[in-house]
Amino acid sequence: MAQSPENIGWRRKLHEIIYEADTPMGKWFDLILFFVIILSVVLVMLESVKEFDARYHKTLLVLEWVVTIFFTIEYIARVISIRKPSHYIFSFYGIIDFISTIPLYVSYLVAGSQVFLAVRAFRLLRIFRILKLVQFIGEASQLREALKASRAKILVFIYVVLILSVIMGTIMYLIESDEAGFTSIPRSIYWTIVTLTTVGYGDIAPQTNVGQLLATIIMILGYGIIAVPTGIVTVEFSRRGGKKTTATSDIAVHLNTQSCPNCSAEGHRDGAKYCFNCGGTL
């Protein structure tokens, strides 16, 4: 059944306001949404402080309901403003928006579900659209590619570190007595990893001279181990920084927040009239 021009008109206008930040109304909507998200995250933090929650519980609950109702209306508006709602519902932001909206409703049915309110912090990722930080995506893309290219070397490195931890942990278990806290090989491996990564909780410590000597060697190795993965990624990042890949050059030409009203695809070139994903009119 074909939709009337009036129906298409208000849906397209609603879509521009909600999904795009290049229009005045879109910017105002995104700024309001951003501050509401900040408020919701602050409320979750304050509710976790028992003394504050006990004193201002009713106020916090009212504000939580205001935020939840706002998110509910926003979620429904996002769904009805596009022709194919499933593209938004099952997208990353769609899932995050849904999970961050339902906890207060579900809390009346399932105790403890309020913990999912913390998911609202993920919605702060929308700041990239609001402040038009798309120009930084090129650098992020280079870093992602560098990590991807380095993954084989990093996996081999982690494998070597795990083998080293098992060997050193086993030796430390044989050297130290049960009284020192090295009661088993797994616990000794745990101590080795904590020491090797320079975390050093201090809950277990070697008491014998030989054990302390081995601990010193592991500590020194830890500094070298921290530098290796950093060096691997830095080399790959520098190598890619010298070349302008097709992906990064493409990113430089679409600095708008144009979203397809049909499939919600973003990242269109400036001045594009049709969606690169579905061919729909922008």
Image: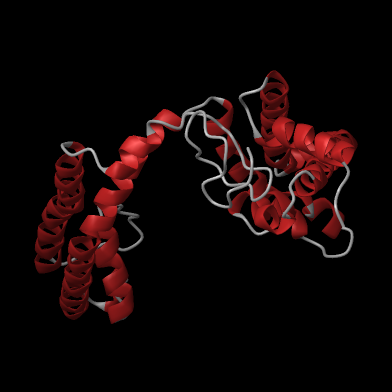
Q: Where the N terminus falls, by quadrant?
A: bottom right
Q: Nearer the viewer, residue 9 or 203?
A: 9
Q: Does residue 55 show up?
A: no
Q: How many marks?
A: 0
On the picture, is 245 further left or further right than 135?
Answer: left
Q: Is residue 111 visible?
A: yes
Q: Nearer the viewer, residue 92 or 159?
A: 92
Residue found 54% across the figure and 25% down from its top: 131
Residue 144, percent from left and from top: 33, 49
Q: Eyeballing the image, is 265 above or below 16?
A: below
Q: Nearer the viewer, residue 74 or 272?
A: 272
Q: Which residue sits at x=74%, y=50%?
A: 83
Q: In the displayed orientation, state which residue is furthest to the top.
A: 24
Across and down, in percent, residue 20 comes to 64, 32
Q: Nearer the viewer, residue 108 or 259?
A: 259
- Image x and y of residue 108, in percent: 89, 59
The spot of residue 24 in percent (x, y) is 69, 18
Color theme of the render: secondary structure
- Left or right of 72 in this view: 189: left
Q: What residue is at 70 percent from the left and 56 percent from the top?
A: 89
Q: Quadrant of the C terminus?
A: top right
Q: Is residue 51 above or below residue 224?
A: above
Q: Quadrant of residue 194?
A: bottom left
